[in-house]
Amino acid sequence: MRLHTTTVLSLSALTVLALAGCSTGITSADVPDSSTSAPTQQEGKHTPASALLSSAALSKRLLDESDLGQGYSRKPQQSESRDDVVVSGCPAMDKLGGDAAVSGSLDFPREAKASFTYTDGSNSEMTEELYSDTEANLSTGVGQIFDAMTSCSAYQVLVGSTSVMVTAQKAPAARLGDEQWSQLLTFSSGGRSSIVKQTAVRTGTVVVVVSGSPGLVDAYVRTALAKARG
């Protein structure tokens, strides 16, 4: 199955990030668990257009070096998305990709992204993504993506000519915002293994997604959420 990266919250970016050498340590808090809060029945039914943020507005709410502190530098944003990401061995992701290809309902056109590297020689990286849509669209779309990615204990990702084995598990999500999702992804390729944590938090009509080494994600997701709220 060939996927657009937006379908799986930049799966190719996570893979490349992991191969760059993220931290491989798992803390005792990173045990499989799911903690999300469901939206109310009326939530998102009558979201005014004024409540949605444009991509330009979202970009002003991204983290920057001053938010992260000394030692961080922002990486140049790649202008093009990859179309050579192929996922196999996970029926739920296959179904998700088919639905997205037909309806495009999992692509959020209002988005902004930033990636950072920590220049201490550890090659630690972190990526932040912001999306804006109605509460209902965000809740459904992000929930489907996280459910699909953690529905299979292991699957294969082919990024160009590089084959990567991925194992996924749900992780506890701190009670932030209106809804929360979190997962741990272990990437194995060429005899190396790296762990990436990805946490998403919805606050109203904005979703914050922070990906990277577990320690960095846990340290900065609250800062990212506070800035995303404006």
Image (cartoon, helix red, strand yellow):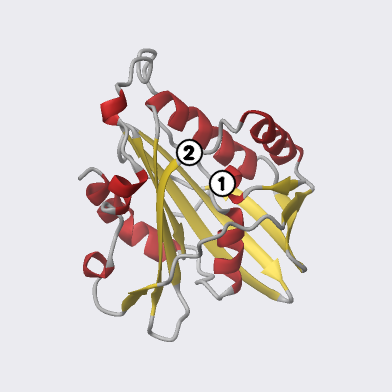
Element type where label 2 sits in the image: loop
Task: Tell me if residue 134 comes above or below residue 31 in the rendering.
Answer: above
Q: Residue at x 37, y 20 (%)?
A: 44
Left or right side of 136 for 229: left
Task: Tell me if residue 190 comes above or below residue 45 in the rendering.
Answer: below
Q: What residue type is labelled 2?
A: Phe
Q: Are marks 2 and 1 in contact (CB under 8 Å)?
A: yes
Q: Which residue is drawn at 40% across and 32% down?
A: 133
Viewer-closest of 47 and 171: 47
Picture coordinates of residue 71, whole percent (x, y): 30, 80
Picture coordinates of residue 39, whole percent (x, y): 38, 23
Q: Name the residue under label 2.
A: 108
Task: Tell me how far mark 2 sits from mark 1, CA to CA.
Answer: 8 Å
Q: Name the residue under label 1.
A: 6
Task: Tell me if residue 135 comes above or below residue 180 in the rendering.
Answer: above
Number of numbered discs: 2
Picture coordinates of residue 20, whole percent (x, y): 56, 75
Q: Earlier in the sequence, mark 2 or mark 1?
A: 1
